[in-house]
Each structure stands twice: as C-alpha cells, then as structure tokens.
Image (spheres, rainbow, N blue to C red):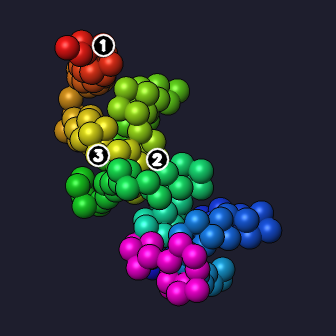
Amino acid sequence: MKIGKSRIAVIIGKNGETKSLIEDALGVNIILDSISGHCEIKANDEASNYNPMNVFIAEKILNAISRGFNPTKAMKLVEETYELEIFNLQNILGRSEKKIKRMKGRIIGRNGEMRQAIERYANCYLSVLGKTISIIADYDNLQIARKSVSMLLNGIPHHTVLKFLETRYNEKKKEEFRQFYKPEF
C-alpha cells in the first residue's frame, strides 16, 4: 500500500513509537519506505498474539492514519466492532476542484460545527483530508454517520441533517435507557 508523504512521520511516530505500538498490538512487522511511502505489512509468526487477520487490521489502521486520523483514534480499529469508511469525493462529485472544496466545507461547517455535531451525535471520528472523507465508528453509528455525510453531499440543508442526527441520537439513548431499566420478573 502507499502512504502519503505528509503522513509518513505520523505513522512512524516519535522515535518509532507509533509503528512499534501497532506492531506489538497486532503481532505484525511493518516495512515502511520513508522516501517513497511504500508500505508492506507482514505477519510475525513468532509473536504471542499472532493472527493472520491482524495483517488486514494493521492495513486498516495505517490507511486510517494516512487518511488524517491520529494514531490513538486509528487504534480503535483493533476492536472488532469498529470499521473504517472512506468517501472518495473525486469519484462521487467529479474532478471539479471547486465542487470538492465546497463539499468539504459543507461537511466541516462553520468553525467545524457540522463535523463536531456528526462526531458527537453519531459517536464516531470524522476526518476530511485531501479528496477524501473518512469515518471510524462501530457498525450502528457508522450507518448514521454515513447517512449524514451522504445527506450533506447531496445538498440537504445543515439544519435537516442536524435534526436527523439528533433524532437518531435520542432514539439510541431511549433504547439504552429501556434496556438499562427493563424490569425483571
């Protein structure tokens, strides 16, 4: 896989801490060329937590970091319930730089308010970098975040998207409340 040159330092981390954290957590070896950005992930058979699936999880984590997430947020992908979703704006909107810039602005909102609202109500992490929008969330919240981002990309007004997010958030909280206070007979 290929890593953007601006994100190579983030993957390596201070004194290689981030890279070794990923390697230790998943039992893999990461071979990263810091000049070209070419990255290769190999399973470490001798590791105590060896699992062939960890190569794919490490790939997701590195992909998330290269898409603009910090390593702490990207490490959430180690949990089985979390997933990474990437919207490629060039594939969705076309090659118009103006249109891509405008849509990125819509997703972020004034002073980052819309992005914060999506993150808060959908309980996810959102990153807007280059020509992509990326989301890290568990499966249920990923559906809500994906729907809200696609609503914004389709030109639906911010207040409608906020209402959708608030409604879904309140439904989730009510269900949690019902489960918590469910009487046992």
Q: Is residue 134 visible?
A: no
Identity of the amino acid at label 1? Answer: Tyr
Q: Which residue is mark 1?
A: 181
Where residue 71 sits in the image (x, y, percent)? 59, 55
**129 left or right of 97?**
right
Question: In the image as oriented, which residue stretches furthest toward the front?
Answer: 185
Where residue 115 sits in the image (x, y, percent)? 43, 33
Instruction: Label 2: state its secondary structure.
Output: strand
Identity of the amino acid at label 3? Answer: Tyr
Which region shows up in magenta? Answer: 39-56
Q: Which residue is mark 3?
A: 139
Q: Which residue is mark 2?
A: 127
Up-down: is 178 above or below 123? above
Task: Point out the tag, 3 or 2, that comes first from the N-terminus.
Answer: 2
Mark 3 surroundings within 10 Å by alpha-carbon count, few (fewer than 14), some (14 through 19), many (20 or more): some
Where residue 117 sits in the image (x, y, percent)? 41, 26
Q: Say if the magenta span includes residue 47.
A: yes
Q: Are marks 1 and 2 in contact (CB under 8 Å)?
A: no
Instruction: Label 3: state its secondary structure.
Output: helix
Look at 51% across and 67% down and name the residue there. Answer: 62
**89 left or right of 73?**
left
Task: Point out the tag, 1 or 2, that comes first from the N-terminus.
Answer: 2
Q: Quadrant of residue 87?
A: bottom left
**23 left or right of 85?**
right
Q: Are marks 1 and 3 in contact (CB under 8 Å)?
A: no
Q: Nearer the viewer, residue 25 or 22?
A: 25
**170 left or right of 111?**
left
Up-down: is 19 above or below 94? below
Image quarter where the N terminus lies is: bottom left
Q: Nearer the viewer, mark 3 or mark 2?
A: 3
